[in-house]
Image (tube, rainbow, N blue to C red):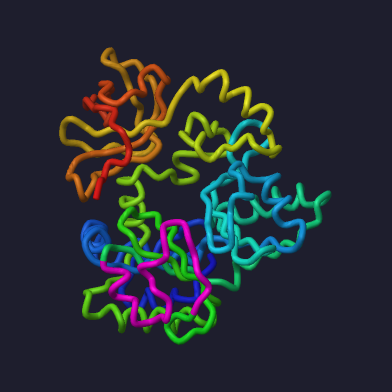
Amino acid sequence: MKNTALTDTHIALGAKMVPFAGYNMPVSYEGVNAEHETVRKGVGVFDVSHMGEFLIEGPKALELIQKVTSNDASKLTVGKAQYSYLPNETGGIVDDLIVYRIKDETYLLVVNASNIDKDWTHISKYNEDIAADMRNISEGFSLLAIQGPKAIKAMQSLTSVDLEAINFYNLVVADFAGIDYVIISATGYTGSGGFEIYCKNTEVQQIWDKVFEAGADFDIKPIGLGARDTLRLEMGYCLYGNDIDDKTSPFEAGLGWITKFTKDFVNSDALAKEKEKGADQKLIGFELDERGIPRQGYDIVDEQGKKIGVVTSGTMSPSLNKGIGMGYVPSNLSKPDTKIHIQIRKNTVPATVVKLPFYKR
């Protein structure tokens, strides 16, 4: 089990620690609902240093990224970020990721913790012919996500840059909490605003301490992965391994908007044909019409109790106080207001397909 540079800090704060993607990670401190509320209304800090970071550099960097990712990275100017995915050769998804353009010929790829080795192998295979400079810097870097509507006010004293001016999916390399060069980005996974800090492992304890000092007047709190999951689900954001995987079609998963056929990329010909044909099933969001909590793996059934799909993510939404979830159903049953049922143990609970996100600020 790997530790982040802040593992001892989390334990000292009384965090409940769990194994996650090969790391010893804090799942909660004072409870998921309270932490969820902190991020929706105030400011909270996640240690998400388990995420993977690859640097792709040099004159061939863009060529490699264009080959292995679905989105059009040629549109990225320095200081911009882009959501994308790595298509595999069989119509599925190796991983979803964020591509940052740090300098003219320097890109940072941020990938899911559980997929670091798989992603590295996949990208390296396509780099054999292209020969861009690739470095896996995951082990040496930490990542804090400072999230919530009060994040900017709480953190502004720690940096000389105007945090308010960093638009969504933008980044700056600047001073923060006494460290001269960190990446400050705004690519949050919670839907409540805020930003992320990428720094070296040797710098993260100082940054963590100063963040909590600066945020004391704003009632800043540490937040675990449990609330991260409920927050992202309320936004309808996919979680790799739950809602998308190696067998998931990006068009079924609603990722057509980041599939750009303005270039040649891995499996692009087959994906273009699939787009033309249309997906047989689609990822939907649904709300339960009665009390109950939908969970991953529960069957989605029709009125007669016949299985029509499966729940990929589900929870009791702390913001809406009702059961919400996502799952795959036949395309003809994917429109908002369609009635479906969720099999929760012996009970068949009625539910309604809704337009994502569930939570609207």
Residue at 31% from the left image edge and 73% from the top image edge: 14
Residue at 61% from the left image edge and 45% from the top image edge: 72
38 with respect to 23 (left or right): left
348 with respect to 272 (left or right): left
Observer-nearest of 324 and 9 = 324
- From this view, report whether residue 338 is shown above or below residue 218: above
Residue at 21% from the left image edge and 80% from the top image edge: 217
Quadrant assignment, res 141? bottom right
Which span is picked out in magenta? 150-174
Observer-nearest of 87 and 225 = 87
Q: Residue 177: percent from the left, percent from the top?
A: 42, 83
Q: Residue furthest right?
A: 129
Q: Residue 45: percent from the left, percent from the top?
A: 35, 69
Q: Per the image, is 96 magenta?
A: no
Q: Residue 243: percent from the left, percent from the top?
A: 45, 39
Residue at 43% from the left image edge and 27% from the top image edge: 282
Q: Residue furthest bottom?
A: 178
Q: Per the image, is 151 magenta?
A: yes
- From this view, report whether residue 174 is shown above or below residue 67: below
Q: Residue 31: percent from the left, percent from the top?
A: 24, 61
277 with respect to 337 (left or right): right
